[in-house]
Image: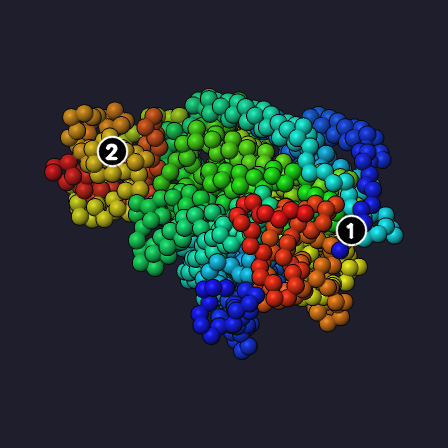
Amino acid sequence: MAQRVVKPKTNLGPGFWPVTALIAVVSAVMVYLVETSPLPIGLIQAGAPADSIDALFRFLGAIAAVILNIVVIYTIYFGIVFARPKGAPANTIGVQIHDAPVLEFWWTAIPTILVVILSIYSVKIWADLQNSKGDVLTVEAIGYQFGFQFRYPKVKGVLNEMHLPLNTPTTIHVTSRDVIHGFWIPELRMKADMVPGLINTIRVTPTVPGTYHIICSEFCGVAHSVMRTDVVIESQQDFAKWFSRQGGGTGSGGGGSGAGIAIDQGKADVGQKLFGQKCSACHSVGPFDQKQVGPGLGKIFNDPAHLKLVDGDAPTPQNVAKIIHDGFQGDIGVMPSAQVNQLSNPDIANLVAYLASLSKK
Amino acid sequence: MATVAPGVPTGPYHAVLDHIHPEPTSFIRKYIFSIDAKVIGMQYFITGAIFFVIAGLLAEIIRTQLLSPHGAILSAATYNSVYSMHGSAMVWFVVIPLLTGAFGNFVMPMQIGARDVAFPWLNLVAFWLFPVAGVILFSSFLVGAPDAGWTEYPPISLQGPLGTNLWCIAVFLIGISSTMTGINFMVTIYKMRAPGMTFTRMPLFVWGQFATTPLLFIATTALGAALAALFIERVFGVPFYDPKRGGSPVLWQHMFWFYSHPAVYIMIIPGFGIISEVLPTFARKPIFGYKMIAFSSVAISLLSFSVWAHHMFTSGMVPWLQLPFMIITMVIAIPTGVKIFSWMATLWGGSINWKTPALYATGFLITFTYGGLTGFFLAAVPADYHEHGTYFVVAHFHYVLYGGSIMSMFAGIYYWWPKMTGRMYNEKLGQLQFWLTFIGFNATFTPMHWLGLLGMPRRVATYDPQFQFWNQFASISSYVMALGTVLFFYILFDSLRNGKKAGPNPWGARTLEWMVSSPPPYYNFKKIPAVLAAPYDFGNPLPYLGLDAAPGATEATPTSASHPVPTY
């Protein structure tokens, strides 16, 4: 069947340049709104890194707005002006062009440049977050089904509430006791998954006092929807008061803890079973350097390369029991306390007996 | 026909084929256990449509639950199963089988001028795994359906109900089916194109299927291994993933996403192919930048293997490793952008015939671009720290999966419906259905962006009352989408009963499937044509030789596959 070729249009189309100008104006307005809105995400910034993450969000928003305008407005415009007129024959054809190399070069090159710029900017903010100081206060958050617990340095045991002092670079180590949970404070724009057997670290510096939510952001079971708690961000004076009420700042590491443990009654075989359940996710039974999350414990009582325990004490059974009881936190990492690990005093005695039996081999 | 055995009639090739493999006459061999790719394609369509309706009802249950911040209808436990099954069914039992098995089997062999796929029996087995796996999946509702989301992260999935085991089996089986289809299509496209159909003369839908095949049979193996390990851990207690016993929960995430990120592209690259067929046909002009569209599909397919960990920026990995995953993810935007601009340029200067498939293809352009742009927000690692695990993610992937994959499928079904059934659909109702779907979809999923940014995590059965308004807005909009879907099925049934006869080529399209009758005959082509050019030159005569040859003529036999002799 021979097709009757109807002469196609060859100009850019009626109104092409006014529409292009419209795209430019709409884009400029949208970029202005994105860049000047005080809260691009609509949620207050309660401290670092919310400011830098929002800045990245603004930048992404501006680029996305321009691209979306170009695609949507041109597409609708082409759809209207190049619609087949009513009554035109069915074999009317469009402009028979196959490509336009110059145009294609630019619409490949410009997105490539944008990707490069975005990557550099994202990497810069990422690097700022990685290098940000957080060590003035170190807090440990532990997720469980279904809630959060917190450990503070020099505070015995775990707390069920989290307080953070203003303008204090804070490192939060997060982990979990059972399944994967999420630790998310939307007002700080910060989140890390709480993975059992793994410690993830985030750094924040709160600047706006208030009570905010810590929300579980990874599905964790039937009560996931209601797994949340409060974080209170308060002045350093208020924080100090709260901290001392929790027993913090009164002494060194809750000295004498673990004193009531009857070490000599520990059974190595029971301890071995417990070790498999409670410790082996993080500790091997090899030498110190055979690290998983924490150091290997196989030679803890007679290791010529490590004459002292990680807390600097001598490797006596009582001191090992103390670390298991209190937990530990230092350069090498963080270990939850016996309360978090759900270990009783006899459990600790059994574990110490097992570790002692390893060191004798 | 010198090689024919004695006693076999010689003559046109199809007559010989008819003798060796006559068209089956029994109902079972013709419609149930058929080895005809077109029938298998239709079986995929029907089975996939049934699962689409079930999974869509689950989606409406989800939205109804979220009408109230306290959960309107279900307990949290039931709700968790409902959304887990919605996601699992939509990904593995609707979008992947429809875009590969259904569209691929029905359209691809005809488009390359072949009579069937390379391995018809493998095709039969691949199809029948699909309904069997689907029944296994949905029967998990009887014993406690999986409740940890479609991603089933351990350790929570180790605590999941018994149905999680069935989930493992069902997804494993559908994975085998995918692998079979991938190998089958790759061989078919590589070996069985009509003479003269060089790679740069293939229709772009075929390019889309071709770029998808390595994803189907390479990535799926990682999922199979992960699923087998999860099943063994749940049933026999071998600790692969449980950290308390020396396993690693993050291992699952790596293996799962090593499959599931490429799977995202399994669910969109064939859709790109559909759009690339629909737009030139209705704009009546050549596809703009044929080679760029074809090669960008291959580029996306290859890049998609090295971005999986962008789903895991908050999961815990060596921090510097986040950067290559972020940058490669952003690089995928470049070939994707090239496609979108090329499709816009295809509309430019056209003589656009605004039928329903064209509306859907254009709607796809807008919604998919939107979904792609929010992907950038998630790829940028620091921004992802805030957005990960929130409704922002839900909004993003529904924009690419519904606004991308499902919109392209709607375009494809309206486009090829006359070819499948020989009947036209009701155009007015089709356009109404588009507007219901397009408006309902955008109104449902746009508010989820800010719900997520403001602090609503995903996978929750109840939520903070401050989010009630936009949740109700989304739920009511989703009923508009549901209405559109009901109308869609009404249009199809109405067309079967009352539709006008379509004739072989109602759209004036130029690819090979439109050169045969509607519905197509058994063996597709009486004579395999020779192909002289890519199919999109609307100003030129059709680039095929041998279709209209006189009865008794032999098939076109060019001297070489890449350089056919005839010119015109």
Local crowd size for mark 2, using a 10 Å CA cut-off: few (<14), some (14–19), many (≥20):
some
Q: Position of residue B244 (x, y in %)?
A: 32, 46
Count of labels in the image: 2
**Which chain is home to disc 2?**
A
A173 vs B49, left or right, is: left
Residue at (40, 25) in percent of width and height: A249
Measured Cα–Cα span from mark 1 to mark 2: 78 Å
Q: Give the farthest residue toward the left.
A: A361
Q: Looking at the image, is mark 1 or mark 2 earlier in the sequence? A: 1
| Of the pair A24 and B319, the residue shown nearer to us | A24
User: Compared with residue A355, is residue B541 higher up or lower down, i.e. above or below?
Assistant: below
Q: Secondary structure at mark 2?
A: loop
- Coordinates of residue A174 in the picture (x, y in percent): 43, 36
Q: Residue at x 18, y 33 (%)?
A: A299
Rendering colour mode: rainbow
Residue A183 vertical placement versus A18 (above, below): below
Please tell me which residue is depicted at 20% across the width and 33% down the height of the picture: A287
Q: Is residue B486 visible?
A: no
Instruction: Please identify, in this view, whether the residue under mark 1 or under mark 2 is nearer the observer.
Output: 1
At label 1, which amino acid type do we have?
Gln
Image coordinates for residue A49, horizontal then vertical, percent: 54, 27
Instruction: Report x, y in % for residue A8.
Output: 81, 41
* Image position of A220 with respect to A134: above or below: below
Subunit that carries the residue with mark 1: A
SS at circle 1? loop
The residue positioned 51% from the left and 33% from the top of the image is: B328
In this view, the residue in front, B352 or A282, is: B352
- Would you name the residue on which mark 1 appears? A3
> What is the number of the mark on residue A290?
2
Of B20 and B230, nearer the camera is B20
Q: Report whether A356 appears left or right of A205.
A: left
Going by the numbered disc 2, the residue's amino acid type is: Gln
